[in-house]
Image (tube, rainbow, N blue to C red):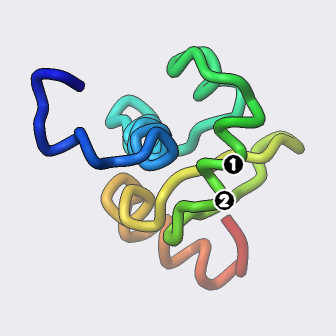
Amino acid sequence: MKDRPELRNISEREVIKAQVRGALEDSRYRWRTLQGMTNQLQLNTGVIITALDGIDDLAVGDRNQQEVFTTRDHWRKTTPWWERILIYVVGHY
């Protein structure tokens, strides 16, 4: 953080939240598992769960009986229009 003065006053919690948001919005994925984010970020699962609690536009889904996460904005950007309509009609992710 020495070379980025704009980050000097940001708390560690906010930095971690930004890292988790970055993992959620990674262009390689539409949805992320907790384990996937843990592996990518090399952070404790509890730390990631705490950061997820602080993300206002978090979307939670279920894939193969496993919770998956993304942001609503990332979901809208990566989900085709026809799939969004189908999900709206069926009523779940």
Asked if residue 50 lies left or right of residue 41, the reply is right
Res 88 seen here:
yes
Count how many numbered circles sit on residues in the image: 2
Asked whether 39 or 68 is in front, the reply is 39
Badge 2 local density, few (<14 within 10 Å), some, or many (20+)? few
Res 30 seen here:
no
* Viewport quadrant of the N terminus: top left
Helix or strand or loop: what does disc 1 sit on? helix
- Identify the residue shown where x is 59% and y is 63%: 59
Asked whether 3 or 60 is in front, the reply is 3
Helix or strand or loop: what does disc 2 sit on? helix
Asked if residue 65 lies left or right of residue 13, the reply is right
| Residue 73 in picture, x, y percent from top left | 37, 65
Q: Are marks 1 and 2 in contact (CB under 8 Å)?
A: yes
- Identify the residue shown where x is 42% and y is 46%: 11
**Image position of 90 with respect to 70: above or below:** below
The label shown at residue 50 is 1
Q: Amino acid at mark 1?
A: Thr
Asked if residue 68 lies left or right of residue 67, the reply is left
Q: Amino acid at mark 2?
A: Asp
| Residue 5 in picture, x, y percent from top left | 11, 37
Q: CA distance from mark 1 to mark 2?
A: 5 Å
Asked if residue 91 lies left or right of residue 75, the reply is right
The label shown at residue 53 is 2
**Image position of 81 with respect to 29: above or below:** below
- Identify the residue shown where x is 57% and y is 15%: 42
